[in-house]
C-alpha cells in the first residue's frame, strides 16, 4: 500500500511564546512555523514567509506589498494579534485578495483598565513617589509633597469613543467627574447615556483636565495631537495615550512638557517603540511611560491568541472569521 502525504497549508507565527492553546488550534489544521526570536525582524519574516497560507503577526510587523509578494500566491490571510491594524497596508491586501482578522472586544476591558491606571498613576505621581521611596527621598514630608490633581470634579475628554473609549468613560464616570467630553464620527448612545457630550477635538483639548487618546491610527488621525492643539491645552492638562504613538507629534509634546506648558503625560505607546534610552521623555518626572502593555492581562492575551488562530482557520474553512476587518 502506498502512503500519500498531502502537504498541509502553512502558517508563519511571527511571534515567540504565543499561548500554546492557540498554537495547538493551528497545528490541527496547518504546518506551523513559529519564529524563534523575541524581537522578530523583518529579515526573519521575509525569509520564512514564502509559501505560507497565513501570517500570525503583531503590530510590530509591517505587512506591506513587498512582504505579500515575497510570500507569494499561497498567502490568503493575515491574522494580527491586535485590534489596531495601522501596520497593515489594506490596499495591498485588497490587490492580492488577502483577508485580515484582528482582535477587538476581547481586549477592551484590559486596555480600559490600563487607561484608568495610567491616568491615576500619572496625575497622582505614583512612579515619582515610588522612586522617592526606594531612593531615600521619603523625608521632610509636607502637606503638598507628591501631590497631584485629583480626578473628582474634573473634565475628562476622550478622543475616539469606540469600545475602549466607551469602557474607559464608564469607569471614569464612577470617579464623580464634572464633565465627560468625547469626539467621535457619530454620537454614541452609550456615552450620551453617561452624560457624555460630543464635541469637536479643539473644544475637547481646550476644556479637558484629562485628555485620553483611544482612537485608531490612520492617515486622518496621525498627529491629531499637534503643536497647535497642545498649545490650546490647560497648563495642568494630563495627556494619556493608549492608542498609537503617532497620534501625537511627539517632538511638540516633548517641547511642551519641557516648558511645563501642560501638566504631564502618561504614554503606553510612543514613537518609536521601544523608546530609545536617550529620549528626553525618559528624564521627565511628569511623564509615565509603559512599554505598550495596554492589553497585557494574562486572560486577554490568551483570548487574543485564540481569536487570531480562529480568524486564520476560518479562511481555510472558507467561512466568516469571528473578527474580520472589512475594507
Ligand atoms: C492592539 O491591540 O492594537 C495593541 O496595540 C497591541 O497589543
Image (cartoon, rainbow, N blue to C red):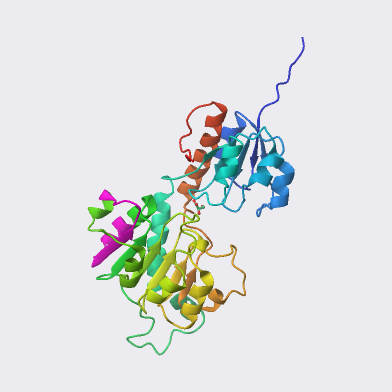
Quadrant for residue 180, please give it: bottom left
Looking at the image, which residue sits at the far right?
Answer: 2
Image position of 189 with respect to 52: above or below = below
Magenta range: 169-189
Name the residue: 56% across, 41% down. 79
The answer to whether residue 209 is left or right of residue 309 is left
The N terminus: image quadrant? top right
Name the residue: 43% across, 87% down. 139
Name the residue: 44% across, 82% down. 260
Rendering coords of residue 102 (x, y %): 50, 43
Nearer to the camera, 194 or 19: 194
Asked if one can make out residue 49 in the rendered structure from this viewpoint, the answer is no
Asked if one can make out residue 99 in the rendered structure from this viewpoint, the answer is yes
Rendering coords of residue 103 (x, y %): 48, 44
The answer to whether residue 36 is left or right of residue 93 is right
Quadrant for residue 173, please give it: bottom left
Name the residue: 52% across, 81% down. 135
Amino acid at each position: 500500500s502506498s502512503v500519500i502525504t498531502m502537504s498541509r497549508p502553512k502558517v508563519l507565527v511571527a511571534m515567540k511564546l504565543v499561548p500554546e492553546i492557540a498554537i495547538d488550534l493551528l497545528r490541527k489544521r496547518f504546518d506551523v512555523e513559529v519564529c524563534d526570536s523575541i524581537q522578530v525582524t523583518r529579515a526573519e519574516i521575509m525569509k520564512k514567509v514564502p509559501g505560507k497560507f497565513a501570517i500570525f503577526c503583531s503590530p510590530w510587523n509591517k505587512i506591506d506589498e513587498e512582504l505579500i509578494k515575497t510570500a507569494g500566491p499561497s498567502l490568503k490571510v493575515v491574522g494580527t494579534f491586535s485590534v489596531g491594524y495601522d501596520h497593515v497596508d489594506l490596499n495591498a491586501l485588497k490587490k492580492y485578495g488577502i483577508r485580515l482578522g484582528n482582535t477587538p472586544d476581547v481586549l477592551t476591558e484590559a486596555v480600559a483598565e490600563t487607561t484608568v491606571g495610567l491616568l491615576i498613576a500619572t496625575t497622582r505621581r505614583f512612579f515619582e513617589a515610588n522612586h522617592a521611596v526606594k531612593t531615600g527621598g521619603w523625608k521632610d514630608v509636607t502637606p503638598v509633597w507628591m501631590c497631584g490633581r485629583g480626578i473628582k470634579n474634573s473634565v475628562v475628554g476622550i478622543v475616539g469613543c469606540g469600545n475602549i473609549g466607551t469602557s474607559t468613560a464608564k469607569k471614569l464616570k464612577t470617579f464623580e467627574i464634572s464633565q465627560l467630553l468625547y469626539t467621535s464620527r457619530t454620537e454614541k448612545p452609550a456615552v450620551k447615556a453617561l452624560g457624555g457630550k460630543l464635541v469637536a477635538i479643539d473644544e475637547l483639548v481646550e476644556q479637558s483636565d484629562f485628555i485620553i487618546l483611544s482612537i485608531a491610527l490612520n492617515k486622518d488621525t496621525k498627529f491629531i495631537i499637534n503643536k497647535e492643539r497642545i498649545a490650546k491645552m490647560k497648563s495642568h492638562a494630563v495627556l494619556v495615550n493608549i492608542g498609537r504613538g503617532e497620534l501625537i507629534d511627539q517632538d511638540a509634546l516633548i517641547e511642551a512638557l519641557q516648558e511645563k506648558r501642560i501638566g504631564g503625560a502618561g504614554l503606553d505607546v510612543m514613537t518609536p517603540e521601544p523608546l530609545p534610552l536617550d529620549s528626553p521623555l525618559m528624564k521627565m518626572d511628569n511623564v509615565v511611560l509603559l512599554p505598550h502593555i495596554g492589553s497585557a492581562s494574562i486572560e486577554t492575551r490568551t483570548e487574543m491568541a485564540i481569536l487570531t488562530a480562529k480568524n486564520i482557520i476560518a479562511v481555510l474553512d472558507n467561512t466568516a472569521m469571528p473578527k474580520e476587518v472589512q475594507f
